[in-house]
Every structure is written in structure tokens, then in C-alpha cells.
Image: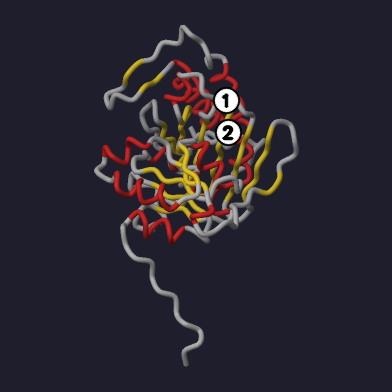
Amino acid sequence: MNTPVDARFGDSLEGRLTLALEAIQQAGLITLQYFGRETLAVERKADDSPVTVADRQAEQHLRQCICGAYPHDAIIGEEFPQQPGTSGYTWILDPIDGTKSFIHGVPLYGTMIGVEYQGQSVIGVIHVPALRETVYAAKGNGAWYQQGDAPPRPARVSQTHPLSNGLFLTSEVANFYRTGRGDAYERLQAASRLSRSWGDCYGYMLVATGRAEVMVDPIAAVWDLAALVPIIEEAGGRFADWQGRPTIYSGEAVAANPLVFDEVLDLLNNRQPAKKADSSEN
């Protein structure tokens, strides 16, 4: 049976973004039903990362919304098996990015949706339910930031440079040392005006909205990163792995405004910055 696409949304990038924005708000409300509960049960997955009923229920809701509207799209999610598709579109879901923050009652967790088309990132949405903040983008249509019921406004990265004037963020400092790259963290921290661990998706939201200059993670899964490429790039920033490749599949990430991006890569890789050509020479 050839199930049709939901006519309310249409078989387009814009339709999928509309669905993503609607579904992510609903999923966020599901997480808030459990947020701050002292009796919330926390399980450990095979990789020892935590998971809760809120993670699973939020992802189930997102999957139901996507399957109902776009039955031929593929889905990859953190908590459930991959669902194949035939349309060329793949939805990549992180129902609670920052589960450690969530279970400790810290409001800096979020829900993330990324969409790829033929392997290229084309839609990204980050929603932070407890703060009622959302940033989203579709390729070629700019990045947008919304707080509460206020109208969306353009999201733009900062113009601050060099890094000695900027704010450097990461999700967990210990991850640098776990991967044998503690020296990279120390170089970044020393070079920055300020460093904080307002991490997970909230850190990337801060970069996309100009409130921080750089966010770096040495460990990240594809569902942690899938939403970021459209958001950061459409906001005027740059997203890449530590080698400067614009990919979500390297297990690491750098997002920054373009004025500090190369400086950050040099610090991560412990190399001297390239010398700029002297315009006075003939």
C-alpha cells in the first residue's frame, strides 16, 4: 500500500520543518511531565549512559508524528532501532540531549531534530523546553530563534574575535581527558576570555544566537549533531569536526563564529596559525 504524505504539510522541506516544529514542542511537553521528579527512575544503557521513561516517550511521540505525516521517510533515533525509508529523507532524533542535566533538575537539556536529504543536512531544530527557547533552520532559509510566545527573530552568530574576547563552551570537561585530549581543552580554556560547561545542545544554541563564540565536544553521537549543521551555518557560523570537515559522523564537533573558527582549530590541533599575507609586499 502506497501511503500518501499528509496533505497538511506537503512533500517539501518547508512542510517537514513545520512538522518538526510542531512535534518538538509536543515532545518537550512530555519531558516536562517528568522533569524535576524525585522519583524518576534512571536506567543505564549498554554504554553506561543514562536513559529515562521521558527519553523513550518523547522519541516515541516524535516517531509517531513523522510516520503519520511522512510514512516513506527514514528515522534514526537514540532510543529505538532505525526505521528504513524510500523518500531520500532521514529524520535523526535526540529526545533528550543532556539527560544527565535532565535527571539532576538542570533546565539546560533539549530535544533535537535533524533531517537529511540524500545524505545532506537540510533541517535542524533545537528546543529547550524548561526555558521555552527554540532555534531552527532549513537550508537556504536562514536560522531563527524563538523564546516563549514571542515572534521568531533571526538567529546570528556573534562577531566577537579573537577568542581572548570570547566565551568557550563544552558539554563535559572530563571527555577531553577520557579521549586523551586534555591538553586541547587546556589550550582552549587558556586562550578564551571565559569558559563554561553550559553544554549539550544548549551550548550550540548559545553559539547560534550570538551568546557564545565557540562550542567544542570531543565525544558526540550522530543524533547529538544532526540538527547543528543547518542551524549553525544558516546563522552565519561554521560547523565541523576537529579536522575542519563539515561532517556529523566523526564523533566530535566544533561550532563557532567564522572569526574565531580557524583559531579554535589551530588550538585543538596544537599548531601555529597560518601567517597572513603582507599586503605591503609586491
Q: Horizontally, is 282 left or right of 32 in the view?
A: left
Q: Which of these two is toward me, 115 or 158?
A: 158
x and y, in percent, of residue 211 in the image: 59, 45
Extreme-left residue of the structure: 180
Q: Which residue shows up at 60% across the image and 21% down it?
A: 29
The type of residue carrying mark 2 is His
Q: Which mark, residue 28?
A: 1
Query: Circle 2 sits on which residue?
Result: 127
In the structure shown, which secondary structural element does the residue marked by tag 1 occupy? helix
Number of residues whose C-alpha sits closer than 10 Å to that of mark 2, classed few (under 14), some (14–19) or many (20 or more): many
In the structure shown, which secondary structural element does the residue marked by tag 2 occupy? strand
Label 2–label 1 contact, CB within 8 A: yes
x and y, in percent, of residue 245 in the image: 38, 57
Query: Total number of numbered labels?
Result: 2
Q: Which residue shows up at 68% across the image and 49% down it?
A: 154
**Dot 2 or dot 1, earlier in sequence:** 1
The quadrant holding residue 233 is bottom right
Q: Horizontally, is 247 left or right of 270 in the view?
A: right
Q: Is residue 235 above or below residue 3?
A: below
Decide if residue 63 is in sight here. yes
x and y, in percent, of residue 73 in the image: 48, 39
Q: Which of these two is toward me, 135 or 217?
A: 217
